[in-house]
Image (spheres, rainbow, N blue to C red):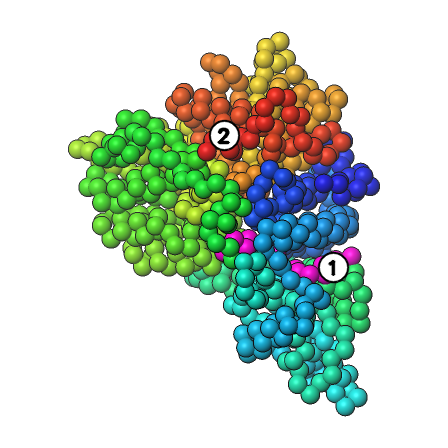
Amino acid sequence: MKDILADKLKKRFINGECMNREYSWLLFDRRVLDQSQDPTNPLLEKCKFLSIFGSNLDEFFMVRVGSLVNENAHDPQAKDNKTGLTAAKQLEGIAAAAAKLYAERAKCYNALRRELSSAGIKILRESELTPRRREECREIFSSRILPLLSVMVLDAKHPLMQFENMKSYMLYDLNRDGRRMIGVLSYSGALDRLYRVGTGEKVRLIPIEELVRAFGDMAFIGYTAGDKMMMRVTRNADFDTHIDDSDVERDFPEIMRRKVESRGKMNVVRLETDKETSRLKDFVVKLLRIKPEFCFTDERFFDYKFMFNLGKFLPPERAAQLKYPPFKGAVPEYVRSSPSLIDTVMKRDMFLSYPYDSMSPVVDLLEQCASDDRVMSISITIYRLASHSRIADLLCRASENGKQVTVVIELLARFDEENNMYFASKLQEAGCTIIYGMENFKVHSKIISVVLKEGDDIRYITHLGTGNYNESTSKQYTDLNIVTSDTTIGEDAVAFFRNIAICNTDFEYKRLLVAPETLKDGLIKYIDRETDKARRGGEGRILAKMNSLTDKDIMDKFVEASCAGVRIDLIVRGICCLIPGIPGKTENMRVISIVGRFLEHSRVYCFGSGDDRVVYISSADLMTRNTDKRVEIAAPVLDGKIADRIVGILELMLSDNVKARKLCPDGKYRRVETLGDPVDAQARQI
C-alpha cells in the first residue's frame, strides 16, 4: 500500500530518535488497514480488519483528540516531551494525516467490495438499483425502516438540536409553501445494517445508509426535499476522572454514572459527512463551531462494523472457506488429567499462553477454590470482564460459600464503566467486598490471590497475567499467565491487596514490581545492569514485548544502553516513540510490530542471557500512564522452563517475516525481509 502519511508530516512529528505519540498511533492503525489488503488473509478476515481500523479511529478521536482539545484549552503552551509540539500543532498534524487515512480507507473498501462480488456477495449502491430492485428496496424501507425513523424539522420553533455521539443523521433542505427548513432524520441502532435483496445463489445486500439515501425523504410528507447530506458527529470522551477521596459520603458509582452520561453532551471533535461541500454542511459547521480541518468526507459510510459479520449471509461451508481455519485453545495434558488443580499448582507452576492455550484452567481453578474447605480468601483485580462472565459468577458463589472475597474493580476502565458498575453491584449483593481502585490511580494489574489453610500452615496460590479476566478476549488476545504457589509471591500478593484497601502505594515488595512506586525503577535497574555489562566489555541484552512505548525516562535509558553496545530487540504492537537505527543513538536497537489474526497484548521484559537472565511478565506497557499513573504489576518468572518458553515465543516473533513490520530510521514501517521460508509467528503457535 502506498505510504499515505507524507514526508512533510513525518518531519513535523519526528525529532531525532523520538516520534510523536499520536503520529505513531496513526501509523499503527494504518498497519491495521494494511491487513485489509494483505493477500495472506482470507477475504472475510480482510473485511474484519477494515472494520477494526474504523473502530480504532473512532476511539482515537473520542479519546486522544479529545484529550488534546482539553489540553489546548487548559494550557495551550504545553509541549509534548518527545517532539516539543503543542497540542494545537499536534491537532493540526492529526487532521492532515486523518484526511489521508479516510481516502485510503475508501480505496480499501472499494477493492474489498469487488472481491466480495467475485465471491458471491454483492453490496449494492442506491445509484445501481434497477427499476425492479428499486421497487423491492422501497418496500423494505417502507415496511421495516420507516416506522422506526425519528424525524424533526428545524424552524423558528425548533431551531437547534443535540446531535448524539456516533449516530448517523440525514439532513434535508426542505421547502413547504415557499418556506425553507431543514429536515433531520435519524434511525434506531436496533435496525439491521444490511438487508438482503432478491433471491438466488448470489447474495445481494443493501446497507441501511443506501436505503435512507434513496427513500428517506418519504418521511417528510407534504415537503419538497432538495439537497440532502448524511452526517455523524464524534464527541469528546476524555472527561475528568479525578475524584476527591476525602469526600467519603458521596456515592462513587453514582458519580461515575453521571460522568459517563456527560459524554453525550461534550464538545464535538469531528464531523463526518458524505459530501465535500453543501449548504447543509455549512449550516452544521457553523452550528457546531467546528474547524473545517476536522470535517472529513466518506461518500458511503462512517461506520464499517457491518463488514465484521458478512459471513452470516453465506452458507456455513462457504463462509468457512473465506475465514481463518478454526482452532480451540489447548489445555495442557497435566491439567486435563489432574483431579485437583489446587494440588497440581501446589506442586508446579502452571503456564498458559492465550489464545493458544485455553483460559478454562484458570476458571476451573477458581471454581475449585470457591468450594474447597482449605480456601479462606480470594482476592482479584478486575479491569474488563466479558458481558457474560463465569468468573463473576464463581466469585459470587465463593462468597456465598463463606469465603472472604475481595474484588478490586476499576470503574474508570474507559468505555467499560457501565459494565463494571453492573458487576460491582452484582458482586456486592453476593457479599463480596468491593474496592473501587486506589485514590486517583487506575488499578490495571492482573492478579488473583488465594489464601489457603492446611492445618496450622498458611499456603498461597497466585495468578499473575498480562491480560484481563475476560473469557471472550482470551480467545482473541495473546496474553501470558502464570499460576504459582511460591510463598514469597503469595505474601506479596496479600500485601498488594492490603495496600489497595488502605490506599497505600509506598511499599516495597519482595518479588513483585508495582507501579507507581517500584515498577519503573525496578526495570531501569535491569537496563542499567545490562548497560554496565556492555561498558565493561561484556554482552548486554534486552528483549522486550509491549503494546506501546512512550515513557521518556525509559526511552532515554534504552538510548543509553544502545550507545553502550547493548543489543536491544523490542516487539511493540502499537505506539513506539523511540526510533531505532539512528547512528550514535539507537543503532543497536531493533523494533518490530506484528499485526495479525490475534491482537498482540502480552507484555514481557527480559534482561541478560544465560545464568543472569531475568524475565518479567507484566500488566504494564512502558507508557507514562502505566508506570507513573496506574497500579500495575510486573512479576518475575521463577520457573526456568517457563522462562525458556516465554523467551522462545519472543524469538519466534523476531523471526516473523509474514506479519512483522520493522520500524526504520526514517520513521516508516516496512516489511521484514524474507530470507528463507515464510514465518508467521502466530500461525506457528496454533
Q: Secondary structure at mark 1?
A: strand
Report which residue position mark 1 lands on. Answer: 297
User: In the displayed structure, does residue 367 sit left or right of residue 296?
Assistant: left
Please provide the residue range marked out in magenta: 293-312
Q: Which mark is residue 82?
A: none
- Gap in Å between the C-alphas at discs 2 and 1? 41 Å
- Residue 98 picture location, percent across and down: 73, 50
What's the residue at 39%, 54% (across, down)? 388
Q: In the rendered image, which quarter contains the N terminus?
A: top right
Does residue 536 lie above or below 177 as drawn? above
User: In the displayed structure, does residue 220 sit left or right of residue 647?
Assistant: right
User: In the displayed structure, does residue 452 sit left or right of residue 557?
Assistant: left
Camera-nearest residue between 350 and 432: 350
The answer to whether the residue labelled 2 contacts the one labelled 1, judged by CB atoms less than 8 Å apart, is no
Residue sitting at the far top: 537
Camera-nearest residue between 235 and 150: 150
Instruction: Estimate how packed mark 1 is, as few (under 14), some (14 to 19) or many (20 or more) residues with alpha carbons within 10 Å.
Output: many
Instruction: Estimate how packed mark 2 is, as few (under 14), some (14 to 19) or many (20 or more) residues with alpha carbons within 10 Å.
Output: few
- Residue 94 picture location, percent across and down: 73, 49
Q: Which mark is residue 684?
A: 2
